[in-house]
Image (spheres, rainbow, N blue to C red):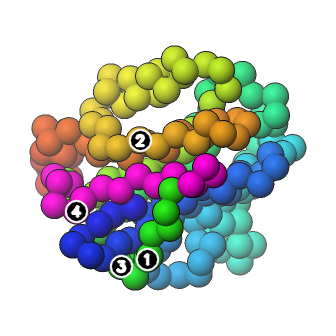
Amino acid sequence: MLRAGDRYALAFYARLTGFDLYCGPRLGFGGQDLFRQSYHKSGQSHLRVPIPAGRTIADPGTPLADLKGKKHIGASSSEPQGLEWDYHPKPDSARRRTAILDLETLNAPSFTSELWALEPGRPELVSEAIRWYEERAGVVLAQVMADWCTPHLLLIAWTLRPEAFAALEVSIQS
């Protein structure tokens, strides 16, 4: 979630119902489910997209009940101007956690929210996931962990390092 003064925008959400996992952005355009990703109990996953069929279907993966280690579930990149700034944050509880990024501290034109499913009882998986970004061109801006469910869920908000953004801009202009 982003905060600009007293206004909020929900950039990404995740909901686990049994072993069915749903996640995605809350965009300021398109339908509510646009780009929602689902990972079902069976291991089958879908992505809601604006095509006649309405979704893409991926090859089946490991059912979440059988997950060992960590699995990247989904992601969404956000630019602040593309979000709806009318969200009202709900308080954290035993079953809800929210990561809030202040827009003023976001020193990048965009950021990405990524959801990981983690095997319970393996706290080292959190640092492994964070290290994955740091070993590339990423800077982790925030993280939030849902450790009350199975599998555990880890949301990481990250952006490119400034030098990576600069290199990307140069390559686009070339």
- In percent of width and height, residue 54 lies at 71, 72
Badge 3 marks a residue whose secondary structure is: loop
Q: Which residue position is annotated with label 1?
A: 87
As drawn, is 94 to the left or to the right of 110?
right
Residue 97 included in the magenta stretch of the image: yes
Disc tally is: 4
Coordinates of residue 30 in the picture (x, y in percent): 53, 81
- 10 Å crowding of disc 3: few (<14), some (14-19), many (20+): some
Query: Could you tell which of marks 2 and 4 lies nearer the N-terminus?
Result: 4
Answer few, some or many: residues within 10 Å of disc 4's Cα (few below 14, many 20 plus, some between 14 and 19): some
SS majority, magenta: loop
Residue drawn at x 16%, y 61% is 104
Which structural element holds mark 1?
A: loop
Pointer 2 local density, CA inside 10 Å: few below 14, some 14–19, many at least 20:
some
Q: Is residue 69 magenta?
A: no
What's the distance in space between the residues labelled 2 and 3, CA to CA?
A: 21 Å
Q: Residues within 10 Å of mark 1 (few under 14, many from 20)?
A: some
Q: Residue at x 33, y 63 (%)?
A: 2
Q: Which disc number belongs to residue 85? A: 3
The residue range painted magenta reads 93-107
Q: CA distance from mark 1 to mark 4?
A: 15 Å
Residue behind mark 4: 103
User: Front-most of 123 and 70?
Assistant: 123
C-beta proximity under 8 Å, tags 1 and 3: yes
Q: Quadrant of the N terminus?
A: bottom left
| SS at circle 4 | helix
